[in-house]
Amino acid sequence: MESSMKIANHRFVDYWFGRSKDVGDAIPPPRFIVMHYTAGGDAAGSRDYMMLSPTQKQKRLGARKPVYASAHLVVGRKGETWQIVPFNYKARHAGVSSWKGMNNLNLYSIGIEIANYGWLDKQPNGKYSRPGQTPEFSVEQIIVDQMPGSSRELKGWEIYPQAQIEQVERLTQALLDYYPSIVDIVRHQDISPNRKFDPGPAFPMERIRSLLHERRSRGDDTDTDTPAHLYVTTTTLNIRGGAGIGFEKLTFSPLPPDTRLTVINEQDDWSFVRLVDTPENTGWVYNKYLALA
């Protein structure tokens, strides 16, 4: 599958863009795409909320502290799409999170918020809702499945419309085409288990993840890995989550001498690399300690 959507300067060309006031610093090329649901109804309302500054959200909610919540993309039930954070800047969508040896995935991922109410309780009339928070759904509009995590309680889950799923699929494909650095597509519930439950069991995660499998089967993951980009480490070398010593060391750090790797991207004196023998492992290393193989 190839996407006709265009990305330029870390923004979708053909979709509405408005920069949120809840944006962090610049981040390295993304390693992950994280899928979320909004837990609400109107997608435009979720977009507008995430456009607010942390102190504006604090005031609206009457919270004790500033509220940090934003994402790169918001997708409505009919497929309408808004981008509110450039893909090379941190959106605050993941919170406390970890995946594949990396913590704080806000620093390494693109967040997609998908309009959906999420989990629903069965009511005495046989319909499903969260009273005072959602409309009522008939059994034809939901699936019944367990809560993710440890509770395993049965809940109703709003079904994602086909137009919405197809749009998420197209957006994901475009991101995979533009960012060869992406190595996985995950759910919020995967990276924050027992704390988050989105996008829930109604979301067709395997259908979306199959796009990554297709890219690997085509060999697109290694388009930049030509012999001219093959290097080895000249000493024991730390590999980090970003371009600088301020970023955390990854769980497979340090790399031993003579580790073979390919350079995917460069930033100042740092290179974003993929390990040849374990290509699922990527990260940033200091250029001084690399030599052509």
Image (cartoon, helix red, strand yellow):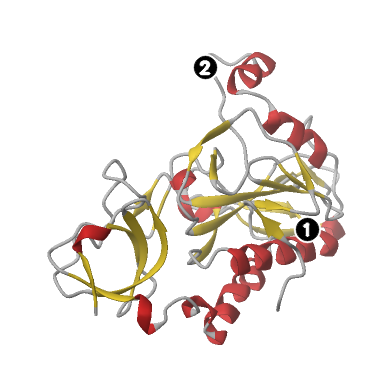
Q: Is residue 40 visible?
A: yes
Q: Amino acid at mark 2?
A: Lys
Instruction: Give the residue displayed 78% in from the left and 58% down from the top.
Output: 159
Q: Amino acid at mark 1?
A: Tyr
Q: How many marks?
A: 2
Tag 1's secondary structure? loop
Which quadrant does the C terminus fall into?
bottom left
Tag 2's secondary structure? loop
Front residue of this view, candidates 146 and 29: 29
Instruction: Give the residue displayed 36% in from the left and 79% down from the top.
Output: 228
Residue that mark 2 sits on:
65
Q: Which mark is residue 138?
A: none
Front residue of this view, candidates 91 and 144: 91
Front residue of this view, candidates 134 and 167: 167
In which quadrant of the rendered view does residue 148 lie? bottom right
Give the image location of residue 190, x and y in percent. 49, 56
Dot 1, how many residues are within 10 Å of its Cα: few (below 14), some (14-19), or many (20+)? many
Q: Is residue 98 left or right of residue 32?
A: left
Give the image location of residue 256, x and y in percent. 15, 69
Instruction: Give the residue displayed 56% in from the left and 41% down from the top.
Output: 93
Residue that mark 1 sits on:
160
Marks 1 and 2, how far apart at CA: 33 Å
